């Protein structure tokens, strides 16, 4: 599978050159011309690097950076502003790198390669599905950068789904993974209740599909 790159750039000429160079380097590129489109893309896919222009018609690159929090996607800002204050602020807010326009494509590709390799290594304990991330080391789930308020059973249920992306699971298989806080087996009727609660908390960020007569599936 190709490394996924999110490109946020409203200048079509610059975007065209970047898309060509990145695809020639064997990356898969999702180009977004504005903040709204980028935020929608984040809910549908997982990215190993985000190249974000700082100034957009409908907001700032930092708006998209905030939406990426919790996904472990490294951010490289692309900007015409060569200001120490902005550079420091970008790094303080978690940016992986910062490059000013105009830039050399070979330099940018080198930086993308570095941060994507670091990202792939760093994300080994991060599970991503739709707009939801689960840090299995910390035992924390986030949605669009915000920590999800989940009970222990809801967290286990979510972890079960994101650990089995694309796989249809029977109710029995799911129940085998769930135990309540006292160590008691979770009953079938209880599973229905918890799936309903989890769906309400996830909203459109992650869809738990009912496979009639079989069980559930998350893609």
Image (tube, rainbow, N blue to C red):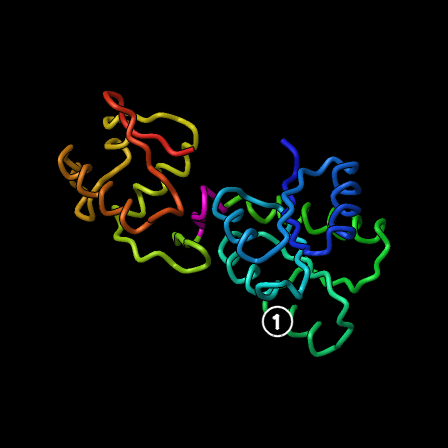
Q: Nearer the viewer, residue 56 or 172?
A: 56
Q: Position of residue 141 (x, y in %)?
A: 39, 52
Residue 158: name its quadrant.
top left
Q: Position of residue 26 (x, y in %)?
A: 74, 35
Above-or-below relation of 193 to 94: above
Which residue is at 45% across, 55% downward? 144
| Magenta highlight: main SS | strand
Residue ranking furthest to the bottom:
85
Which residue is at 29% across, 25% downward? 211
Is 149 on the left or on the right of 5, as rendered?
left
Is 168 on the left or on the right of 152, as rendered?
right
Which residue is at 41% across, 36% downward? 163
Q: Position of residue 86 (x, y in %)?
A: 69, 74
Q: Nearer the viewer, residue 19 or 12?
A: 12
Q: Residues within 10 Å of mark 1 (few under 14, many from 20)?
A: few
Is 86 on the left or on the right of 132, as rendered?
right
Q: In the rendered structure, does residue 183 fall within the stretch colored magenta?
A: no
Q: Position of residue 87 (x, y in %)?
A: 71, 72
Q: In the rendered structure, does residue 131 fall within the stretch colored magenta?
A: yes
Above-or-below relation of 22 to 168: below
Residues drawn in magenta:
126-137
Image mark count: 1
Which residue is at 17% across, 37% downward? 186
Residue ranking furthest to the top:
213
Q: Nearer the viewer, residue 33 or 143?
A: 33
Which image quadrant: the N terminus?
Answer: top right
Above-or-below relation of 28 to 14: above
SS of the residue at dot 1?
A: helix
Which image quadrant: the C terminus?
Answer: top left
Name the residue beneath numbered marker 1.
Answer: 92
């Amino acid at each position: 599978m190709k490394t996924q790159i999110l490109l946020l750039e409203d200048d079509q000429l610059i975007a065209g050159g970047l898309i060509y160079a990145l695809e020639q380097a064997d990356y898969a590129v999702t180009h977004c011309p504005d903040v709204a489109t980028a935020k929608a893309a984040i809910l549908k896919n997982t990215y190993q690097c985000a190249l974000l222009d700082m100034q957009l018609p409908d907001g700032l690159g930092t708006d998209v950076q905030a939406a990426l929090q919790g996904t472990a996607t490294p951010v490289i800002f692309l900007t015409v502003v060569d200001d120490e204050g902005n550079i420091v602020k970008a790094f303080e807010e978690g940016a992986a790198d910062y490059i000013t326009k105009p830039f050399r494509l070979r330099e940018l590709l080198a930086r993308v390669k570095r941060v994507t390799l670091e990202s792939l290594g760093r994300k080994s304990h991060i599970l991503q599905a739709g707009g939801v991330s689960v840090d299995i080391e910390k035992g924390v789930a986030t949605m669009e950068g915000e920590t999800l308020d989940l009970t222990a059973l809801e967290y286990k249920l979510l972890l079960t789904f994101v650990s089995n992306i694309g796989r249809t699971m029977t109710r029995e298989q799911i129940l085998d993974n769930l135990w309540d806080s006292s160590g008691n087996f979770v009953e079938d009727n209880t599973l229905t209740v918890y799936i309903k609660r989890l769906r309400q908390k996830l909203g459109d960020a992650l869809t738990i599909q009912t496979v009639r007569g079989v069980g559930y599936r998350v893609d």
